Every structure is written in structure tokens, then in C-alpha cells.
Amino acid sequence: MSSPGPGSTNGEVDRLVADAGRLLQSGAAERAITVCREVLKKAPNQPVALHLLGAACSRAGDLAGAVPPLVRLLGIQPGNADAHLLLGMAYEGQNRLDDALNAYRQALALRSGWPEAGSRLGGLLRRTKRFDEAIACYRSVLAIHPDDDTTIFNLAIALHRAFRFEEAAACYQTILQRHPNDAETWVGLANVMKDSGQVATARACNLKALQLRPDYREAFSNLLFVEAYHVLCPAGELLEHHRAWAQRFAPDERAGRFDFSGRLDGDRRLRIGYVSPDLRRHPVGTFVEGLLRAHDRSRFEVYCYDESRSNDEVNRRLRSYAQAWRKTIGQGDEAVARQIYEDRIDILVDLAGHTRGNRLGVFAYRPAPVQVTYLGYCATTGLSAMDYWLVDEALVPEDSVESTTEEIWRLPRCWITYEPVADAPEVAERTSGGAVTFGCFNDLSKLGDEVVATWAEILNRVPGSRLLLKAAPFNHEAGRHAVVQRFTALGVDPERLILRPRTPDYLKEYGDMDIALDPFPRTGGATTADALWMGVPVVTMAGARMIERQGVSMLRAIGLADCIAESREDYVNLAVGLAGDDERRRALRAALRERVRKSELCDAAGMARAIEAAYLGMWKRLEGAF
């Protein structure tokens, strides 16, 4: 301890330091700060006071104020691992990520295997997408504390984010052996199973989590997602599950808090509010861009409620199309609903459904007189407060089996528009008469057993043909091996499989593909449009549900309906027939881009007019009800 200043005693300093510690422990951070500063006037280098001041400033939210005392303390005690950890947390809170990483590394170096420092360092490495480093960090902790469940859980997350599915699943299963009733671990395992294509197991894991914790919102949303996107239950049962979610997490009694009297005059510009976590580089951001840009500003005002943390180039472009842009991260549902009401939104549009980051809880409050779900999900929301589900006639035909709480409103044209990448490569020529290459760049979670069996049959019927797959798990040997095993079990030589990892510039690799195979029942979206833009014909199968008909909508929009199969047998025959018709494939490759460019799929203005007509129709119907 440093010498006390004039007029003070060691006993007085010790008493004040003890007082500061008690205040901090009781939650009185501001008072602790005052006492620490009093101490440091008397003894400027008192180490415990410096440490307590850094901790108290952090607790009070003054992260910048926490840094100087901690830096001064480390000048006195460079081996103080706790101070390095606190400093790292202060840096991270200020988004000084490199400084935070260095501080966490120092803490872990000084106290090898320290679970708390490992958790902080690994978490920040995950946040910055340095997954291999995060994995190494967690494993260094486990080398000393092999049974630390928190570190094993964090390792599972890092492995999952690195697409090392088998290793991630093994970590979750290790925890469940000791803690079989841990609902959070069951959800983690469910997410791994879903992303690796084991969707039935993912469903079972989410159900187990809900059995253990009926109020587990994430587990319930994950269950709805996997059931809807992978068609795991009948439409009526799916509707009941969505209604059960709404009753539990977005009950009807929330509605009715906002008064719209005096707001229903349609002789003015209507305010349209779009709510989404995906107003960024994401399929939703890509498909909604043309609509936002082409809205008729003389008749509509556009407001966006953005739940994403992104500031990428797509997010910045979308901002330029809106009259107002509100960030909603960290705000409660009722607060966001109040903002929407105060913005006087007339028609509120959900672009997420039950996907990650959704704000369906906001819609339960009915902050706008008309509420619509569109684009981001493939089924009902289950909300009685959601008035319409906006689709097209190909996606959800009149005789559809879909069951919804919303009224289905069908557009008379393709429900989306495609925004080609500005620097997309030119369509590459393919050599005639060579081996045909089928391909799919969809996520591996869509490749269920029936898809693999169907594609294996196609390959076996087309001698010399190959299958090009591109997905993130192929960064690792384990990911490649798992897929190879599935095909070799069905008689496909591994040499006929071309497996490539995901890369940002994947469009050019369509130049190595002759025919794109759309997976099922969960069909492609952006990947289908990308393939067509790159001159690659797509074979799709029309199913009964919306998620099974995305390819139907796009292929009809560009006049390629003869590539739509009505059954598995038809799908195989279409693919095999196209593989044997060099002349047709060559003609399609030469013409597809221009055909797409001139079609509804690239007609953003036409799309905007169709959706605006739908909005006006909904609004007039509302006016007529009053």
C-alpha cells in the first residue's frame, strides 16, 4: 500500500476501502465510486481502491471511467489477472475489441485454464467470427478443467458456428449425460441437428426442452421453424402449434391498447411500416430491396423497424429508401409497439414470421390498424392480431392445404423480385457433349434422406454425371465425409461428388454447373434466383405447402414451367431428360439471363404496384368496416 497523504492514517484508508467494498457488494456502485475517489486522494496508488473503482465504474455503466484506474493498477501490479479481466470487459463494452482481446489473453496467460477468462476471450473470438481461435481457447481451459460444463457449452457453440456439427453435438451430449434435464442444452443440440439436416431429431430435442421448460420461448420458436420449413406435421397440427405459441407468448389480451379513431381516412399518403431483423445482406434484404426502392412516394411513406445489428452495404442502401428508420434492438415489445403507434403507421408488415430475431410480440399489441405478414416465413404466425398473409397464386393456390389465422391475400404475380449482384460475372459457357454436372448451393439442412436418394438415382441414371455441392460444412473433412457416406451408401462413386466450402464469390461457380437441382420439401429461394441469373436451369418439385413451391413461383415468373415436376418420379425424369438434351441446355444457358431480366422476377416497379394495390385493397376493406 502507498503511504497515506498528509493528515490521513493507514487505518482511515483501510476503513474507507472496506466501506467501498461493502457498498459495491450491496449494489451501491455510485456511492462506492465516491468513496474510492476519496481514498485515492489520500493514497493515489492504493491498489484495492483502484481495483474497486474500476469495478464500480463498470457496474455503473461508466466503462470509459473504468479504464484509467485499472491501467494504473496494472502499472503497479502487472500480474493481477483479475484486473486484466476487468479491463478487458471495460474495453469490450466500448467496442475496443483488439484491446479487449489483449486484456483477456493476459488474464488467461497469468491464470492458466481460468474458466471465466476463457469464457470472455472465447466469446469475443466468436463474436469476431474467429471460431478456430475460440475453439482452441475453450480447449485450453478444458485441458485443466475437463468437467467445466459452461466451457463445454461454449465450445459446442463455437464448433457449431464453425460447422463442425459432429463435434458440437458430442459436446452437448456430454453435458446431457450429467444434466439430462438441462433445457438450454437440449435446444443447443436441436440447433446442431437442424443445421446438419437431422430435422426429425431437431424436432424431438426442441420438444424435450419444452417438456422441461414450457415457457422456453426460443425452444418453441425453433420447434415451429423446423416443423414448418421441413414439413414435419400436417397443416392443421402446425396451425394449432402456432396458435399455442401465440397464446403463451403473444396473448390476445395485449390488443386493444391503441385507439385508431380519426386515423382511418384514406385520402392521404398511407404509412407502411416494415419490421424485420434481416434488413441487411440476407435473402429477405435482397428480395425486399426492389420493393422499398420502387414504392410510390406520392402515395406511401415507408418506415422501417430494424432489429439487426448490421451496418453492411445492403442495410445502408435500404436506409436510403425509407422516410424513417428505427432501431429496435434491446427494446421491449410494448415499447416498440408504442413507437409504431406514435409514428401513425397505417399498415404494419412483418418480414420475419417465426425466424430468429422476429418481433411478433409487437404485433400482438396491434399498434397499426392493418397488420400483414410477408416474405420472411413459410407458414401462419398463429397471431389473431395478424390480418393477412401476403403470397402469390403459385405459392398458395386456392386449393392449398395451408391452415392460417390470417386471411390469405394472393398477388396476381410472383411475390418477390430479385436484385442481381451488381458485379455478377457473365454467364460462363459450358462444353457441349461433356459430362453433365448437376448442382445445388443450398444449405445442407435441406438435404434430407429423400433428397439424397433422389439425387443418387439421377446420378445413377446419367452415366458419367457429377454432383457439385457447395456448403459451409465442407470447410472440414468431417463435413465432407458425412455427405460422401450418404451418397456412397446409395451406389454413387465418391469421385462423382464435387464438394466445395462456402465462399462470398460463389456466383462464378455456377459456371461449373449444367443443371441445378432444387431440394425438397424445403425449396431454395435466393439460390434458385441466382442459378437462373447465371444461366443454369433449375428443376424443382411442386409440393402442397408454400415452402415446397418457391421454385414454382419463380419458374412460372420466367416462363420455365416445364422444369416444374409434380412428383418425385417426374422430378427424376425431368432432370435426366434435360441432362440428355445438350441443345436445349445450351439454348437455355444463352437466354436465361435476359429472360430473367425481362421477367416479373426483376420487375421491381411491377412488384411495388401489385403490393401497393394489395395494401390499398386492405385499407379500403378496413374503411368499409367502420
Image (cartoon, rainbow, N blue to C red):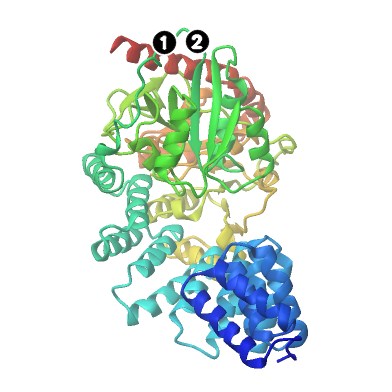
Q: Amino acid at mark 2?
A: Arg
Q: The N terminus lies in which quarter of the figure?
A: bottom right
Q: Is residue 160 left or right of residue 70?
A: left
Q: Can residue 102 be seen?
A: no
Residue 214, percent across and down?
A: 25, 59
Q: The C terminus lies in which quarter of the figure?
A: top left
Q: Is residue 210 left or right of residue 446?
A: left
Give the residue pinned by disc 1.
Answer: 265
Give the residue pinned by disc 2.
Answer: 268
| Residue sitting farthest toward the front | 7
User: At x 45% / y 61%, what residue is drawn?
Assistant: 196
Residue 560, percent across and down?
A: 51, 26
Q: CA distance from mark 1 to mark 2?
A: 7 Å
Q: Is residue 110 above or below residue 488?
A: below
User: At x 38% / y 46%, what residue is drawn?
Assistant: 229
User: At x 72% / y 39%, what residue is drawn?
Assistant: 428
